Image (tube, rainbow, N blue to C red):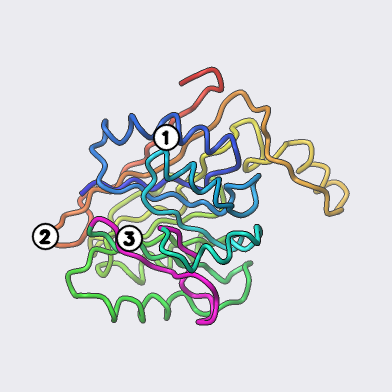
Amino acid sequence: MNLLMIGDVMGRPGRRAVAALLPDLRQELALDLVVANGENLAAGRGITEATAQELFDAGVDVITSGNHVWDQKEIIPVLDQEVAMLRPLNYPPATPGRGLLTQKGITVLNLQGRTFMPDIDCPFRAADAALSELPQDAIVFVDMHAEATSEKQAMGRYLDGRVAAVVGTHTHVPTADARILPGGTAFVTDVGMAGPQESIIGNEIDSVIERFLTGMPTRLPVAEKSPTVQFNAVLVEIDEATGRANSIARIDRVYHRDGV
């Protein structure tokens, strides 16, 4: 089975890049499942029904998220509906939405780290609880949405041999450490983003620099004028017989506003 995970989709530029590139990638890579982190879909902060639908229309099967999932209030009731959209599993039990779902034979599990992030429930124990309730032969793919590289790597090692893949999201900066861990679990610290290339993690450069220079809480608009959009993803090939990964490879593209 071939699964493509797209990094954090950043605003309109990211949505357009996914819409332009994904249909061809689905055929070129013979994709069985496409997952994308969508917590920055709506102008860089949160998700709306309309922006989520753009991803689904482009061919994304499951949308994962993270700490920004609550930024657009309209999405909160939608999370309780039968839509292929997740919030991190390790929010407290009364939180709207769900943290895992099964699509096309693969269970997608969404977790959120706690280092430099909101102090929610433990993602490691939440993963243990979820896995204990799944069938022994379940194929599980994990989006570990976290700030600290060490926490993401720790989750990869903790779940090694128990899931098909653990991939990190949140920082918008792709890492070069995609590998198969000793127990057969595919891992990468951060997938990266689908977002403006001429930017600072997807935001307008001058606005970010101003915030660092002044310490003031300035607005950070998405860098809409960037002529190019980086599309960062990873392709995981999963052995259906073992539920472990055969390979993981970076799939990085550049989308030009005038075309590919």
What amino acid type is highlighted by mark number 2?
Answer: Ala
157 w.r.t. 201: above or below: below
Span shown in magenta: 84-104
* Few, some or many residues within 10 Å of mark 3 (<14, 14–19, 20+): many
Residue 242 at x, y percent in the picture? 14, 62
Q: Give the residue displayed 26% in from the left and 36% down from the top.
A: 29
- Helix or strand or loop: what does disc 2 sit on? loop
- The label number, if any, that marks residue 141 in the structure image: 3
Q: How many marks?
A: 3
In primary-sequence order, the first of circles 3 and 1 is 3
Residue 138, horizontal then vertical, whole percent:
22, 68
User: Cα distance, mark 3 to mark 1?
Assistant: 20 Å
At a point 47% along the width and 47% down the height, the residue shown is: 7
Please identify the residue farthest to the top as the structure is shown: 258
Q: Reply above or below: 125 against 76.
A: below
Disc number placed over residue 241 in the picture, else none: 2
> Residue 152 in magenta?
no
Looking at numbered disc 3 in the image, what kind of residue is underneath it?
A: Phe
Query: Residue flagged by tag 1: what amino acid is it?
Result: Asp
- Circle on res. 252: 1
Q: Is residue 172 left or right of residue 214?
A: left
Q: Quadrant of residue 137?
A: bottom left
Query: Which of marks 3 and 2 precedes in the sequence?
Result: 3
Residue 142: horizontal and vertical position, in percent? 37, 62
Disc 1 packing (10 Å; few <14; some 14–19; many ≥20):
some
Mark with earlier residue (2, 1): 2
